Amino acid sequence: MTTRLSRRQLLQALGMAGAGLVLAPPFLSRAWAASPGDAPARRALVTVFLRGGADGLSLVPPVEDDAYQRARPTLALKFEGEHAALKLKGPFGLHPSLGALMPLWSEGKLAVLPGVGLPVTPRSHFDAQDFMESGTPGRKATVDGWLNRALLDAKDDAPLRAVALQPTLPRALYGNAGALAMGRLEDFRLRTGRQHGDARQGFSALYSGAVDQALKGAGADAFEAMSKLDGARLAKLPVSPGVTYPGTPLSRRLQDIARLIKGDVGLEVAATEMGGWDTHVAQGVTQGAFARRCEELGNALAAFAADLGPKLDTVTVLVMTEFGRTVKENGNQGTDHGVGGVMFALGGGVKGGVHGRFESLTVDRLQDGRDVPSWTDVRAPLSEALRACRPGVALAKVFPGYREDSALGMFT
Amino acid sequence: MRALPVWPLVAVCLSCASRSQVTAPEAPAPFDEARAVHVLQRLAYGPSASDLSEMKRLGVEGWVDAQLQPASGDALPPGLSAKLQAFPTLGLSMAQLVEDYPRPPPEMPREEKRERGPARVVFERSSARVLRAVESPRQLEEVLVDFWFNHFNVSEDKGAVKWLATSYERDAIRPHVFGTFRELLGATAHHPAMLFYLDNWRSTREGLSQEELRHPRRFRRQAAMMEDAEGEEEAKPKLGLNENYARELLELHTLGVDGGYTQDDVREVARCFTGWSIRQPRKDPGFVFRKVAHDAESKVVLGQVIPAGGGEKDGERVLDLLASHPATARHVARKLAQRFVADEPSPELVERVAKVFLDTKGDLRAVYRALFQSPEFQSPQARAAKVKTPFEYVVSALRATNAQVEVTPRLLRHLALMGEPLYRAPAPTGFPEVAEPWVNSGALVARLNFGLDLVGGRLPGARVSLDAFAPKQAPSAVEWVDGLGQALLGAKPSEETRATILAALAEKREAASAVDEAPPVDVPLIAGLLLGSPEFQKQ
């Protein structure tokens, strides 16, 4: 009875004192819990999911592989002429529309992994994305996602530790560790119309008095997060001098992620995505739909890296897709759903270069005679990235049933 | 301990003359509003003015009984019927939908795509789901359709399911929610949406050779099986056994993850279902049994021998076996108890309901009845013990405010923002029935915004007239809070809620008093705070 009364008194006090008091308890408890520990430094992990099955053989073409050239009479990139790729290493080039990434490559901050994918072969986008994001290939009943399970190693309940910059929470962030999704940073605020602060303070007080503990916690987190995002510091955080984000959707999302990182809000994991990679017809080479996607991707990532500046060392970016596409181009100058794709990693902890296993694309080496195999199980680079970003993470829980056989050395 | 209310249902009373002697002399109990609200929170999408008055007319028990026996021929209210009839895709067959709403060419203008492509099918399906949930007087049926669709989930995100899910809900789920579990299970097992979603349509016996496929007469029929899910010409996936459906059938649809089956059982079940296929998902989506793809050898499922040569009947025998299995009874009872009673239902309740399931051979109406009559459901502890899912939240808010609804893409997007994009649950598990995955700060902000938009007149497609809730002429702030609280929450708001809302209003008045002495009561603020309150998140 006394606690009830005191809570009511607190609420009455609040009516006069404003919302600051409500926000105090979670902040205090966290400050207390986060005493300077011996925990090794963590890096923020940012994932960019290319939806639609991006053509790895055009993102990172094995230019000097004859079998590749033969299989794609109109789509193959070369090292000279109008379809010239940028030279990476060995037979590999980079799609010219990703040229914005070349400075990162030269600095050794960009890693490329061809022939990466699922150890199972779903040719549906839906199944492949599901497996990729649940982190349990072949098992559909998994409820949560690998990225969320990776957060369960620490009890930190900072409200902005896991954020998806996309309208709905991606499958990879489903789970017991709190994660929130927002289309844009500005979406994460109350649309109170003319009422402004009244509703915000009212809600804040209502949730601090919630009987349901889960709702109470979510409420406290929401208002704490909103106040952090509200701060003039974050909303107006300037883009680093000399950096221009192109006005594309991915670019805007990455800019928001950079704001969260630069604003030191406690971000540990951020996820975003980009669609439009399903290229069954008229894929184009250095012109057309695919090249435009590449340009959007490369420019957005480059702007993101430049905006972060030295802080890029505290961030690891993974760019992934649900599968690669058929080796042979189809009758409509497009490519169909395949198996092995490509992954990019850039930023802190990344060992630049081309990693993993890759072989000539002669038909006898292809899966079912048509696909780049998953020479590297996607869980290998993900595990390595997690180990580099979150030392001590329980990988057996993140990827149940997966046993790493050898190190890729893609991350330090 | 207070005595539990007796639930005099027709079925029970047939066999209990003695009980009527006990209850007969008593005067009819006064209408228990709190209990009525509890029943409407669970068996309906929250209290609405019209359902509350219907319940007062029939009594709580009478209302429940009527909900359990909806006359299928009964017409829906004219307003709702008219809205549904404005959606041409709802009544079309799968073949018609595939033909009339084909995948649009990329260059088609966006506006035209929305009208003539599958986007139209998708939009009308979701709209109808929302409208029925808000307005249908057969509320329990709507709740059950949601429950069973989710239990036997398919997602329109996967290829051809976009065109098939309308029929799935209309023909496989809806007609059976008051039937037997076996009927429901069988209807889903045969439906092209499920066969496609869980890949069974392409599952064949091991070793089906290319030569057999090239057999001139058979080739034409098998060719459909080579069509890729995404319609690529080049893809020629190998055929063979696909365990996907078999696994989910055991794990999700029937026995449950701890239901005592083994990987061998999964495989054997998959063998039984080989040949259960679709004629052509994108041209002629109907069930077909492909004899040439079926594994004709004998199988052993859960220790039972299924003799060789059963053909299509193998699958039926598996369904018979699973539908009557005690583990299925427990699994289904537990899930229903989670939906209707508590996130963590007591094992005793689950056992009791499971027994009814087994005793009645999976008569779902009897199972629901057992659940609704249970002391656990009736107990005060069950009240407001569950957090609403986003769909329950949105629909209950529309009902509580008596909103005039025309579904718009914006309204549906609110659901997606809260984490429940309709017909797009990302895994065969469906959307979760329990609170935990729904309660997070991002989703909460989305809920608060929905409430604010709704009462602030900023939600296209939903008109709310708060004036209609005015408790009297020129009511004071206190009267508005009490009146709207009662109307929207279905009960008096808690003291804390009341005090907090009044404090928020006072603050606004203080701010305004510098310029104006008596600003009007900010009714939308009160309503917005109530819809966003922790109480309104619970059911």
Image (cartoon, coloured by chain):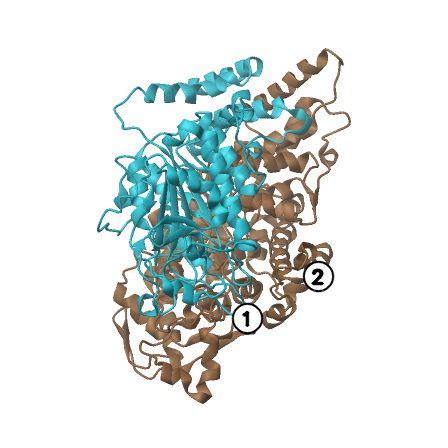
Q: Could you say which disc has been placed on residue B282 in the image? A: 1
Q: Nearer the viewer, residue A371 or B424?
A: A371
Q: Amino acid at mark 1?
A: Arg
- Where residue B407 sits in the image (x, y, percent)? 67, 50
Q: Chain of mark 1?
A: B
Mark 2 vs mark 1: tell me if same chain.
Answer: yes
Q: Position of residue A299 (x, y in %)?
A: 51, 41
Q: Which chain is brown?
A: B
Q: Residue at x 36, y 29 (%)?
A: A156
- Contact between marks 2 and 1 (CB within 8 A): the answer is no
Residue furthest out toward the front: A81
Between discs 2 and 1, the one toward the N terminus: 2
* B386 and B276: which is toward the camera: B276
The C terminus of chain A, quarter of image? top left
Q: Quadrant of the N terminus of chain A?
A: top left
Within 10 Å of disc 2 (Cα), the crowding (few <14, some 14-19, many 20+) is few
Seen from the viewer's position, the closer of residues A89 and B74 is A89
Residue positioned most to the top: B514
Vertical arrangement, residue A366 with respect to residue B404, above or below: below
Q: Quadrant of residue B236?
A: bottom left
- Disc 1 crowd rating (10 Å Cα; few below 14, some 14-19, many 20+) is many
Judged left or right of residue B166, residue B462 is right
Q: Which chain is cyan?
A: A
Q: Is residue B296 above or below residue B377?
A: below
Q: Label 2's element?
A: helix
For disc 2, the marked residue is B85
Give the image location of residue B49, x and y in percent.
66, 43
